[in-house]
Image (tube, rainbow, N blue to C red):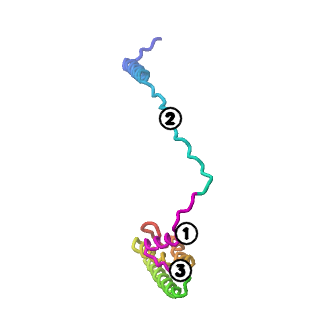
Amino acid sequence: MSARTPTWLLAGGCALTLAYLAGRLQTDAAPTPTAVPAAASPAPRPIVLERAAAPAGLTRDELRAAIREALAEERGAETADPTDERTAPEREARIAEARSVALEVVARGLDDGVWSVEERAALRAQLMDLPERETHEVLTPLFQAINAQRLRLDGPPI
């Protein structure tokens, strides 16, 4: 009972065997990568146990004041102390105006049912002037509407 194996099966088996051996011979002939020696690390920095002498001229408080002034100029903010009695009413007026504008922006977005990029930009501009308590007051209805899925977002909310 000798069954005859189809020719195409024998030819395919031979082809696969030859392909396997040829691939194996190629990988055996390829040079193996050698480990690259690690670059020598630089010498550790010495530990300094003495304080350097302060440069003559500016004291610590003068240096802090100069840095505060430079940062205030960069931001375009006032350099006056916010607790100063002369600026307190101006600051309160600015906060009240920013709060009312921010609440209007949020109300407009809630009425439209869509929070757009323009509304986000308008709200961001007002949040810069608001303290923490007023910021929470403005943002609470916005995030409640988002969580209740009453507001569709066109990007990040803030």
Residue drawn at 47 percent across, 81 percent down? 98
Task: Determine which residue is flagged by label 2.
Answer: 38
For the residue marked with disc 1, what is the amino acid?
A: Thr
Provide the residue designation for mark 1.
59
Q: Earlier in the sequence, mark 1 or mark 3?
A: 1
Q: Is residue 32 above or below residue 40?
A: above
Residue that sits furthest to the top in the current view: 1
Is residue 80 covered in magenta? yes
Tell me if mark 2 has few (under 14), some (14-19) or many (20+) residues whose alpha carbon lies within 10 angstroms of its own: few
Disc 1 versus disc 2: nearer the observer:
1
Number of labels in the image equals: 3
Image: magenta residue range: 52-81
Which callout, 2 or 3, points to the residue nearer the camera?
A: 3
Distance between the alpha carbons at the discs numbered 1 and 2? 47 Å
Q: Which mark is residue 44?
A: none
- Under mark 2, the amino acid is Ala
- In this view, 56 is above or below 24: below
Give the labeled residue for mark 3. 81
Q: Nearer the viewer, mark 1 or mark 3?
A: 1
Q: Amino acid at mark 3?
A: Asp
